[in-house]
Image (cartoon, rainbow, N blue to C red):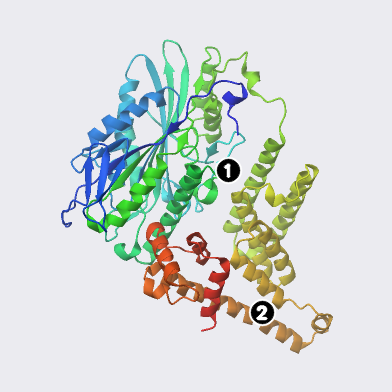
Amino acid sequence: MYSPAQKRGKKLPPPQKIKVICRVRPFLAEELYDDTVMVEGNCVKITNKRKTNENFVYSFHSCYGMDAGQPEIFENDVKPLLEPVLNGKNATIFAYGVTGSGKTYTIQGTETRPGIIPRTVQTLFEIKGLSKYSLDLRLSYIEIYKEVINDLLVPRDTAPSGGLTIRQGFDNQIYLPNLTEKKINTYEEFKKIFRGACRNRSTAATKLNIMSSRSHADMCIYISCTNNETKNTIFSKLHLIDLAGSEDNRRTENGKERIAESGAINKSLFALNQVVEALNQGLSRIPYRDSKLTRLLQDSLGGENISMMIINISPGQSFYADTYNTLNFATRTKEIENKPQSNHCASSTRQPLKVKLVNENNDLPEARRQRFNLSSSTSTISSTASYELRPPLLSKTEMEKIIETKLDEKLSEIEDKIKTQSSQILSPIFRKQNAKLKKRIESLEYKIELQKESRLANVLTPETKTKTARALVALAKAHELKNELGEALSNYESAFQYIPDNQKLGNKIIMIRDAIPTSSEEINNLNAGSKISAKDHHSRYLANIANDERRKIAEAMILSIVNSGDVKQILKLKGVGKKRADVIHQFIKENGHISEIYNLRYSGMSDKIIDGIINSYTQL
């Protein structure tokens, strides 16, 4: 996808690699000191666990030892980043590391030792005091908790139950409809808002951290910087992100609720790892859509933002595996190249009208989006040249993008309605939405056919495919509850076209097919009111449900064994030898627990082997 600057033939700035800095936290009072992790200059050394006379050495842009303070990190590495931000470039700073390694302390800080967020805002207000610049600062603050996006600037009891949704505009910009943005006029006003937002964030105690963050948090500062002499205005955004830490539930001794949280955290961090891997391999498809976190980080990883990652390390031999994995991830990440763009708007006659419009619509996210989407260009916009930004016609790719975006929005609306309506009125809603959905899909298929596209699924993005399938599955379940198995099967099969790798859905289709009478004799018996045939038909359906339940129990047992990380137990699984058991053990150790049995594909196991393991347990 070309940027506006490329379309106009302007030379783009050279790509910039992601800047990585490392911070090692001090030992806690209850921890025993050792020299497994050492900082020397811009390098981190860790002792080779197998050969203690050897060290692994990792070099980064900056490295900070246990005695480094908050001001030192901010002054050396964060403050210099504000200059390009004030010159119109968007930037992202995010902290990465295992739970208890000091990420929240680095990003958020405490009242007496403020972190990067409060120090950044304070510095921006100091710049605002200079006579040369006029700064308008606004902020938003969200968390991703168990794949649900919550707005931290509004009370929990007034926030939508399903959280905020992610949207992508026609200009490929990611935005969140209905996200709260608050204008801040003083640093004291910011501190009051920030305290309240931090209290809204999801935290809980674990064995490794008494105040463990259970969510990823992203504070975005929107900056409008006007030069009082030239009247030029520059728009930019600065994301300050505190990622939740990956967890080993055996060490944290998490309960049921904490395990569910850590599962969501580990899954999103695994998706982040996959994005980094895909970027380093130069793959054509980058899996940004595999999680909410990677979707929001799309511009920060291989996009148009200046990015800096702070890796936080826990010292000591007991965290050796976590430290080793974190340092290797950082080494891969620092090779990713971004292409930062500048956002300018210089117009002495039109700019006051723009400011007036935004001031009169402070509470309207759409007005805010228009303001910042306008700034994605790298050139100045004037009243005489604005028409040059409009393409003469829509290309095939752009048309497909528009169709996909519209369908995506409609499917989300249907999904939201399904969640909020009571069970008493679901049936008519499902019938109505089913007709609308089929009509829209047929319309889209017709348009694609005119463009000589053979399949609808080939056009849609993975996320849109998933949402389409979700809506169809919801419709199928409604028919299944009313024993309308034919309609249910039709919707399940339609959903399967969009997610053909979903084994559970495939099994469901087989179960429904087996339960539906196929021979003319069976159908005639049922039509004639034969009680025996109807009873047999119902018994077969119940038997299939029982088989489905046995399969779920078997999958749960297998997941328990795999997630335990015990090689001896893993070896007992059918078709798993010593080599494969070691691979599974290492996969779980590096990526955390898995929640779906078919995630074992990522460790190199085929579906045939996984099915064999499941079948061996269902026959017990």
Residue at (63%, 47%) from the top-left corner? 408
Along the horizontal axis of the image, is 39 left or right of 244?
left
Image side of residue 143 versus residue 527, left or right: left
Q: CB under 8 Å between callouts 1 and 2?
A: no
The picture places residue 302, in percent across and down from the top left corner, at 49, 38
Q: Residue at x 41, y 57 (%)?
A: 591
The numbered mark, 1 or 2, whose residue comes first in the sequence reads 1
Q: Nearer the viewer, residue 9 or 135?
A: 9
Q: Residues within 10 Å of mark 1 (few under 14, many from 20)?
A: few
Question: Horizontally, is 114 left or right of 384 in the view?
Answer: left
Q: Would you identify the image quadrant in which residue 264 lies?
A: bottom left
Q: Position of residue 548 (x, y in %)?
A: 58, 75
* Residue 138 in the image: above or below residue 560: above
Residue in front for this viewpoint, 223 or 180: 223
In this picture, is 235 found above or below 547?
above
Q: How many marks?
A: 2
The Cα atoms of the two marked residues, 1 and 2, are separated by: 44 Å
Which residue is more in the foreground, 424 or 236? 236
Q: Residues within 10 Å of mark 2 (few under 14, many from 20)?
A: some
What secondary structure is marked by label 2?
helix
Identify the amino acid type marked 1: Ser
Does the rendering let one see residue 136? no
Identify residue for label 2: 541
The label shown at residue 284 is 1
Tell me the SS state at disc 1: loop
Q: Nearer the viewer, residue 611 or 477?
A: 611
Figure check: 594 above or below 438: below
Q: Residue at x 34, y 21 (%)?
A: 128
Residue 36 screen position, x and y as percent: 21, 52
Mark 2 is on which residue type?
A: Tyr
Q: Is residue 613 left or right of residue 428?
A: left
Q: Is residue 93 above or below residue 345?
A: below
